[in-house]
Amino acid sequence: MFSPVSLGPLHLDHRIVMGSMHLNREDDPRALAAFYRERAAGGAGLIVTGGAAVSRAGAGGPNYLLINEPAAAAVMMPVLDAVHDAGGKLALQLFHAGRYAFEASFGIRPVAPSEVYSAFSRCLPRALTLAQIEDTLADFAAGAAAARALGFDAVEIMGSEGYLINQFASPLTNRRRDRWGGDPQHRQAFPRAVLKAVREAVGTGYPVIYRTSGADFTAGSSTRAESADLAVALARDGADAVNVGIGWHESRAPSVQALVPPGRWLDIAGGIRGALAAADVRVPVIGSNRINSLESAERALAAGHADLISMARPFLADPDIVAKSRRGESHLVNTCIACNEACIDRSLGTEPVSCLVNPRAGRETVFPLRAVPPPAGVRVAVVGAGPAGMQAAATLAEAGHAVDLYEREGAIGGQFRLAGQVPGKADFLQTIRYFTNELARLGVHVLTGAAPGVAHLARYAHVVLATGVRPRPVPLPRSGLLPVLDYRQAFADPARLGARVVIVGAGGIAVDLSRLLVDPGAPGGARDVTILRRGKRIGAGIGPSTRWAVLQEIRAAGVRTLPGTTPLEVSRQGLRVRDGNGAAALLPADAVVLAAGQVPHNPFHAPLAVRGVPCTVIGGALDASGLNAVRAFDQGLTAGTAV
Ligand code: SF4
């Protein structure tokens, strides 16, 4: 991993690339420069920018950088200076969304090889004319020339993930019968023409990386062999590196969700690398997708899957991931947990991208790093060591305050400890590992199993109340002795539940619990599980990039999902309900679990306020609606800087 490598004329001193991420901050040069500066200073060898659209029609949203418009220079010059000052290298990604563009962005109907409806952007694109194809090639060439003139160290052509170039390569979206479509050779024509146009624009001595699709994961699209053939052709045509992407936005095979095991798709990059070797083409291959630690990157390199590893979200979670790992401080790396809640889900809309476990990401100018040692602060108590409390305590300690962090339970982590039990969410425990080590490094006094009283707390100069939530009570008549538990009790001791479990509620916690209970490895083994709710939306509150994948998984595992169902009574045999048609029914069960939301738990605020103790209430204790972890970490950061 820490050995040098060359992408054509571009020399890098290690093999970790920070992959492209659209940030929705491309209109703010100061924010963008600060964001990238920290990642370059944190050891990212080569950084690839978010997609820079080569035309308005090709933008993936209204906030995309438009590389061929005059404003691009003003945005990107400070970014280039910042990255170069910090010792990094920056590649511009040349991007065209094709049928994944949105008409609402610039009032332009999206374009594509053929008129094939896009379920992602919900549009029927216009087929490009022959003249428009030539114009598009010219746009790519102009974008590449602009990047070189501005001082970028390389360009990356975005040819995967179902965007325009990938659409030309696929029989699903390219139905043309002219020189740009038809058999696999003709479908390679546009991707290869883009590379040729870019190469001619930048010359032979300038690095051009090509991100191509190793597997589309979309029914009716290119075969794996066709994708490998294209990669070989691109390498032969002069790409200096082949970066292997997978999946389309319309794919029904999860690629970036937490339920995808880390490194799951690296064999696809390995397949491309094998195809290049078999064709005797020596071009470095960059592997990506679901690699969230340098240890797993090292394993992937050692296994021969790739020559370099591209990681994107892990650099949101921790800008110093490379530097820390290089210093032997992996235990201090804040690990990306693949929740997508503050990054991918936002990048699909217009909200600025950040990170759930690192709410500073993208807001480095709002919460600047301290250049001088902090002044001696005051004594602060933080009550509750869930996400909000952990973040607040760390931020307060960094600001120079003497912090005592109280946790009633025997360990820190709050709801993250529950989530960490769920199959596929073990990385949530990495967040607890990170804060355990980070709080120790910062000198926070962590007191677990401790329940301070009001008089004790009143001795502090400031108290941050992050006491969290309690399960929302659901008043259900009962006849018989069937066990009825709340979700925390169920998570704490799944073995108590019998073979058939009905969960009242179908939000994120209920879905997580169902995943745990149908897992053969769960305490007590796999169960028959039903989840229900009065409303129509199972998994409400789960982010859009994750919800479909999780629902697909639990249904495949046999979880019955019953929307529009009203719980009536717990009987000896199970739960009596009224179904969506108004008919009464019995759901046989050995236990009923209540997971129908939560209420704030905030016992200290009123008595402390009466005594005049300055308090800040954050996280679920302030607002339990939707139990939003992004909000909790964010409030922890804000509270920690406000004292
Ligand atoms: Fe990773 Fe979640 Fe942060 Fe995105 S928001 S970078 S998925 S931890």
Image (spheres, rainbow, N blue to C red):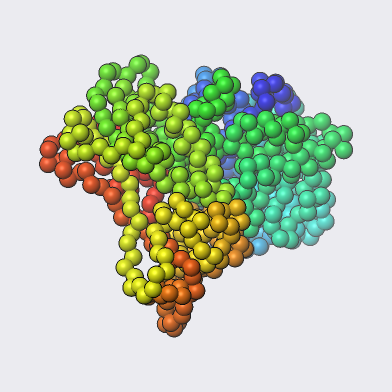
492 or 186, which lies in front?
A: 492
Against 630, is 19 above or below?
above
The spot of residue 340 in percent (x, y) is 51, 46
The spot of residue 380 in percent (x, y) is 26, 29
500 or 115, which lies in front?
A: 500
Residue 50, by quadrant, is top right
Residue under the image location 34 percent in, 38 percent down: 449
Residue under the image location 63 percent in, 31 percent down: 295
Against 205, is 163 above or below?
below
Q: What residue occupies the far top of the structure in this picture? A: 372
Residue 599, by quadrant, is bottom left
374 or 34, which lies in front?
A: 374
Disc tally is: 0
Against 147, is 373 above or below?
above
The spot of residue 490 in percent (x, y) is 45, 56
Of the 4 image quadrants, the one containing the N terminus is top right
- Residue 146 seen by the camera: no
Of the 4 image quadrants, the one containing the C terminus is top left
Residue under the image location 51 percent in, 37 percent down: 430
The spot of residue 214 in percent (x, y) is 73, 46
Residue under the image location 48 percent in, 68 percent down: 590
Task: Determine whether, in the image, residue 320 is placed left or right of residue 462.
Answer: right
Task: Determine whether, in the image, residue 356 is placed left or right of residue 232.
Answer: left
Task: Determine whether, in the image, residue 602 is placed left or right of residue 57.
Answer: left
514 or 88, which lies in front?
A: 514
- Residue 482 seen by the camera: yes
